[in-house]
Each structure stands twice: as C-alpha cells, then as structure tokens.
Image (cartoon, rainbow, N blue to C red):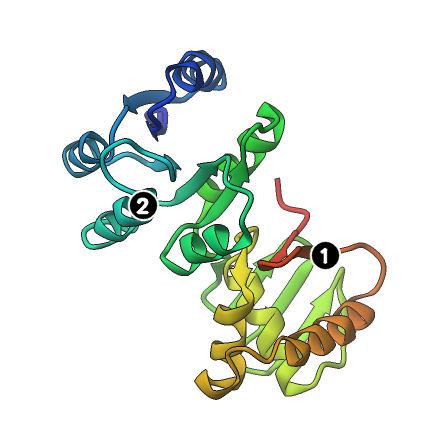
Amino acid sequence: MNAAPQILVIDDEKQIHRFLGPALEAAGYVVARAESGAEGLRLAANGAPDLVLLDLGLPDLDGQEVLRRLRDFSAVPVIVLSAREREAEKIAALDGGADDYVEKPFALGELLARLRAALRRQTASIDEAGTIHAGDIEIDLARHEVRRSGAPLALTRREFALLALLARHDGRVLTHRQLLVALWGHAHAEDINYLRVSVWQLRRKLGPGNVIVNEPGVGYRLRSTQA
C-alpha cells in the first residue's frame, strides 16, 4: 500500500494552517507546517515532501526567495498561495519554478484539484513509442502527428510545438515568456501577439471544448480530461 503523500504548507497565517491542515488530512494527505521561510526550507530539505504549498508573504524571507532556494536542491512541485493580486508576482513565481498558483481567498475544491494535478505528474506521460498522452490528445513526437479522440489533426510545425510543450506540462501554467522563449527565442520574449495568434489557431483546430485555458495576464495551461 502506497504511503499517503506529504504536503508541506509554508504560511505564516495560523488560520490558514487551522483550515488547511484538517482539510488536507481529510483528503488523505499527511501535512507538515512551517510558519517561516527558513523553517519551510529546513523541513523541505529534511522531510522530502511530495508537494509544497507556499505563501509569498512570509515574515523572514520573501516567498520568491524561498522558492529560489528550494529550487537549488529540490524539484518538488510547488503551488503558490498568495493574496497578492499583482500579475507580476504570479509571473515571477511561475518563471522562478512554481508549478501553479492559487489566490487567497481560495475555494478548497479548486485547491485540491490543482494539488491532485500537480501530484499526478509534473509532466505528461510519454510512452515507449514516444507519444505524449494528455486526456484525449495523443502527440506522436517522432512522426509529428496529433490525434484527438482518435481523429487526426493537421497542425503547422509551430502549432505542433506549442501543443507538445503544453501537453508535457499538462495542467501546469506556462507563462507568456516561457512559451515565447521556447518557441520563438529570447528575441521575441515580449511579443505576446505571436503567442495569441498561435493559440487561437490551435484552439480552432482542436475543436469543441476549451482545452487551452488562458490565465489572464500570466500565460496558458492545457486542461486535459485526465482525472
């Protein structure tokens, strides 16, 4: 029988711990808590959690700095919890290695869904034949072929590359900058219109259902049908 995943919650708000602790335990997780960045880093290094919920407004270290130090020694999935509404904060966290973010106040159901998605895998599964599976989407990397529910789709090279990148990080937010640099290079890191046009074209070819989700001002995520 597999051990229950351990969730490390790094947040200085006691009410968050009082709320999240029992809720996460009721959902089948083991919970560790830290009320400062330094304590959180120590627990992350010594306890090897399966996922970290990280607040950006900590009393000793800025959450962005905690994330940077955490990424120096761990690839653990990180979901940022923050009351900060500035888009720049979300983007900086995602560019700095966070896997997702949830704004305070948040709905427990949404948080648990994001948590399950992050734990399920950090990247979409790639089988021995070199095919990415993300819900009903299959991407054959060797043949540059895409099928949705078994039906072939005719994509340009750029559309194929965009879909494959999103599918590799199924459910994770990728920022505009991350996508632009990966697909167009650093010279076009700010040319968001390039990305918007490609996303529009790709959505149209994928057909019904909003598979590519826009995170306003931040980036895009692939929302597959996987549980």
Q: Estimate the x, y position of residue 78 in percent, counting from the top left.
A: 38, 43
What residue is drawn where x is 29% and y is 22%?
32
Q: Residue at x 33, y 36 (%)?
A: 50
The kind of residue tagged 1 is Val
Q: Residues within 10 Å of mark 1 (few under 14, many from 20)?
A: some
Pick the residue in front: 157 or 90: 90
Q: Is residue 30 left or right of residue 73?
A: right
Occupied quadrant, residue 45: top left
User: In the image, is residue 16 above or below residue 67?
Assistant: above
Left or right: 207 in relation to 101? right
Residue 93: which numbered mark, if any? none
Vertical side of 77 occupied by 92: above or below: below
Percent of width and height locating residue 172: 52, 53
* Residue 130 is at least partly visible in this image: no
Point out residue 106 in the picture as x, y percentages from the top left corner: 58, 29
Residue 14 falls in image quadrant: top left
Considering every residue shown, the one lying at the far right of the view is 208
Q: Residue at x 57, y 51 (%)?
A: 171
Q: Earlier in the sequence, mark 1 or mark 2?
A: 2
- Between 76 and 79, the one lying in front of the other is 79
Read off the residue under disc 1: 211
Along the line of sight, which residue is nearer the eye, 40 or 201?
A: 40
According to the image, label 2 marks what residue? 76
23 is higher (above) or lower (below) than 98: above
Check disc 2: other Cα within 10 Å, few if <14, some if 14-19, many if 20+.
Answer: many
Classify the position of the N terminus by image quarter: top left
Q: Is residue 214 left or right of residue 126?
A: right
Q: Secondary structure at mark 2?
A: loop
